[in-house]
Amino acid sequence: MAGATREAAMIERLWWRAGFGPRPRDLRGKRTHADLVHEFLHPRGATLEGPEPRVDGRPLSPANQYGQDVLWWLDRMVRGRHPLVERMTFNWHDHWATSNDKVGDVKLMMRQQRTLRRYALGNFRTLARAMVRDGAMQIWLDLAGSSDEAPNENFAREFFELFTLGANNGYTEKDIREAARALTGFTFDYDSKRFGFDPKQHDGGTKHILGRRGRFGPLDVVDLALENRHHAPYLCKQVWGYFSPRTPPPRLVKQLVSAYTQSGYEIAPVLSLILSDGALYADLEEPDMIKPPVVYVAGMLRQTGTYITTDDWVWMLDQMGQRPFYPPNVSGWEQNEAWLSTSALRMRFQAAASLLHDAIEDGAIPADRSPEQALEHSRTYAGEPWTSKATSSALASYSRLSVAGRDEKWEVKHYWPERERVLRQVLLAGPDAQVC
Amino acid sequence: MPRGCSDWHGTRAALRNGGGRLVPIPERALDGLPEFGRGGLSRRDLLAGGVGLLLAANGMPGLTTRGVLEAAAAQAADAPDAPILVSLYLDGGNDGLNTLVPLGDARYAELRSRIGVDPATALPLGDTPGFGWHPSLAGLRELYDAGKVAVLPAVDYGHPDQSHFNSGGYWRSGIVGPAPDRTGWLGRTLDAVGTRDNPLQGIHVGWGQDPSLNGKHAPVASVSSPSDFGFYIPDVWDEKAFLPTYRRLSRARAKHPSLAAVRRMYGNTIETHDRLAPLAGEEKPAPPPIAYPDTDLGKALGNLGRLLGAGFGTRIATVSSGGFDTHDAQATAHADLLQDLGDSLRAWQADLDARGLSPRVLTMIWSEFGRRPEDNDSGGTDHGAGGLLLLVGNRANGGVRSEFPGLTRLDDDENLVVTTDFRSVYATLLEDWLGVEAARVLPRVPGGSHLPLLRAA
């Protein structure tokens, strides 16, 4: 691959993996890949651009209208000017997967989301401590109300298994039970919606956790887990997993772990290494990561310069398998091939179709438009997406054959626009559009 | 993948190339089959051609006995009377001890001091004193009393893992511990008995993908509503304008597994759409004899009834029902879940009866683990071990069919002692119900794996 082309392909991949896809102008910019990585890691200026979302002519009201929490977040992905912050905020939502299905309070979910955003590129220890005290999390994993009399293990278990160490990775059932004791004392009053900490309900006794012994309190559990030698490799691999479906090369894991631990659990140095490493840009000629539904939808909106004017995206995302604020369980969404099923793919097809609604009117395409021009116009509309050789040649032959012999006036009026509707559809929803 | 695969594919190829010359199976081809097929397919059945086994004469010489047998099973898949297994997953870890309540166990009331089922309200099991169904389970009790429910308390595996993710993964893959690949036990079953061209042989009723149905070769489908699987582009008059292009793209080669998987799944999706055509226009399907509850589970089973009724060659279907992770405020939530479960199952069996399908369908109801015998301070229960597994169907061997270990002696984590390995249940269902050699699907089947789960037809 020639130097300039490779640079362009790296930039396109960066936008998809570290953001929510490129707008057409993002691919035509003058900045180098290295400039962009720096910009992603050091966001400045306004966080949003473009028109505010409206549904039925009204602005969103996430806390009051069904599904508008999802639209609110999708809008951030579409209009956000700090791609990596947006993407990491969502990645952390997947990591600390909390579902409003149980929390049942959009305000608490939004508050958690703000916390994830604040530390998106920040310090993992600070984030973990904030998550222990987060209201939505405390309800989700039964931390609120867990008392010395009856410690609830739910949070302690997932904290080790999913948030910090990895399943069966350096801890035992005994550690979970002891950590649950250390985490007792948080309270929640359902009527006033107030969270608190009651020292009388905290187990102040000695605990044995991860080989250490002491009268540990809730936030000590964070430090004990982070200081465990299994934590840094686990977390660094998790973070890498958000950017690539491939196993990270061992030398890169070593670098990530050392950057992470030497900085005192800072995430930015880890991200900087990942986004600059050649391993992320393997096989640029054929992308190898399946877009998560939010990336697919937000990306499609960005590619076509579309803004949110309908709440159909809520159920469509749901049926593609990814509704923000509603991860399927505490381990978050399963990635890559797990996104694929016949019904989810059909919904991805339908999502593109709904975007194309009313885009080209009958009679709007002149009869002298050549097959090549039809394809070129469609590619421009769809934001110049990557296409494989197979797709390029299938579209070229479709562009020729679909209107061949259709010269009657009524045929030109309908079938010439129909050709471009189909071309746009395949470019936005076909097999190639599912990978990045 | 077990090495039997090449045998099977050889057999299929021979069948396809046989040009319709049909001969009975020579008895020598069945040598070395003493124990296979204790229920589903027997040596005798094969000799009698009872599964519609038709082999091309020129395909015989190279075949192993296992190849013959599995060709038969593959053929049976196309037969209109092939058995169907439905997996109904209770997502989150159902509290078995409050589903089938061990009323006769002296420690129950003490361990469940906060959310125990009142013995006065429990629905007694006529044939098994000491147990009662949760009061919300009238629907299930009716089926039990009709002898259509085999009950297995305390099913799990040795040293059970209390993580949803791990334990659920083990149940879905059929392998305890790290799995070698993404396949699930039901997907591998379809690899063995299924076809390579019919996604509707394995259906997940829902939007997502069910990992237990992942196979290496056999395509499967997720269908939520069978009459709603169309492809539309606004102002494009006919799907024929674009489906050929999509079909062409789904067959293109890819260099990497992700794009290859997308293309394959696109192919399955369009194939599913094509095959569902008979149901596409069915606006108002005939109502079942007993109405399904207006719940996600009721709707899913109702849709599955329509799919099975249409005769798409389905062998395996999966449905799941969520909300069973009852860490807090369990009493009312669990009662509602069980009400839905019992009522849905009653309607399901009545629907299958009305369609003439009930002799062919067996429904396995399972969860990734049971819950802790001692309830917690939040009015809920934490993750435990030894879950309750149910088999529902005309051929289910009604009654309590595995040992309940009691609550006096618990394991090191204060959980129910596991008496039955779930892989033994799978192995029994594979051999006795689906006619597949268990070892082809399950790499490690524990000893003594045959359980009395089915009764004679």
Image (tube, helix red, strand yellow):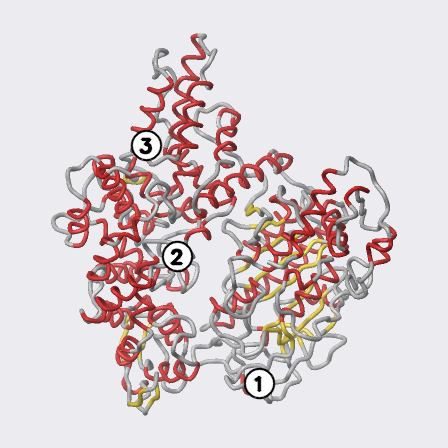
Badge 2 amino acid:
Tyr
Mark 1 against mark 2, which lies toward the viewer? Answer: 2
Q: Which residue is mark 2?
A: A326
Task: Identify the residue at horizontal 70%, vertical 63% (top origin).
Answer: B429
Q: Earlier in the sequence, mark 2 or mark 3?
A: 2
Q: Secondary structure at mark 1?
A: helix
**Quarter of the figure with residue B390:** bottom right
Residue furthest bottom as drawn: A205
Q: Which mark is residue B376?
A: none
Q: Is the N terminus of chain A in the top left, top right, bottom left or bottom right quadrant?
A: top left
Q: CA distance from mark 2 to mark 3?
A: 29 Å
Q: CA distance from mark 3 to mark 1?
A: 65 Å
Image coordinates of residue B90 in percent, x first then y, are: 56, 64
Q: CA distance from mark 1 to mark 2?
A: 36 Å
Q: Is the C terminus of chain A in the top left, top right, bottom left or bottom right quadrant?
A: top left
> Between B26 and A322, which is closer to the camera in this rendering?
B26
Q: Chain of mark 2?
A: A
Q: Residues within 10 Å of mark 3 (few under 14, many from 20)?
A: many
Q: Is residue A302 above or below residue A197?
A: above
Residue furthest top as drawn: A408
Task: Identify the residue at horizontal 55%, vertical 74% (top origin).
Answer: B370
Badge 1 amino acid:
Ala
Q: Is residue B22 left or right of residue B358?
A: right
Image coordinates of residue B278 in percent, x first then y, are: 64, 35
Q: Which residue is mark 1?
A: B109
Task: Identify the residue at horizontal 40%, vertical 42% (top origin).
Answer: A434
Badge 3 amino acid:
Ala
Q: Secondary structure at mark 3?
A: loop
Q: Which residue is mark 3?
A: A382
Q: Secondary structure at mark 2?
A: loop
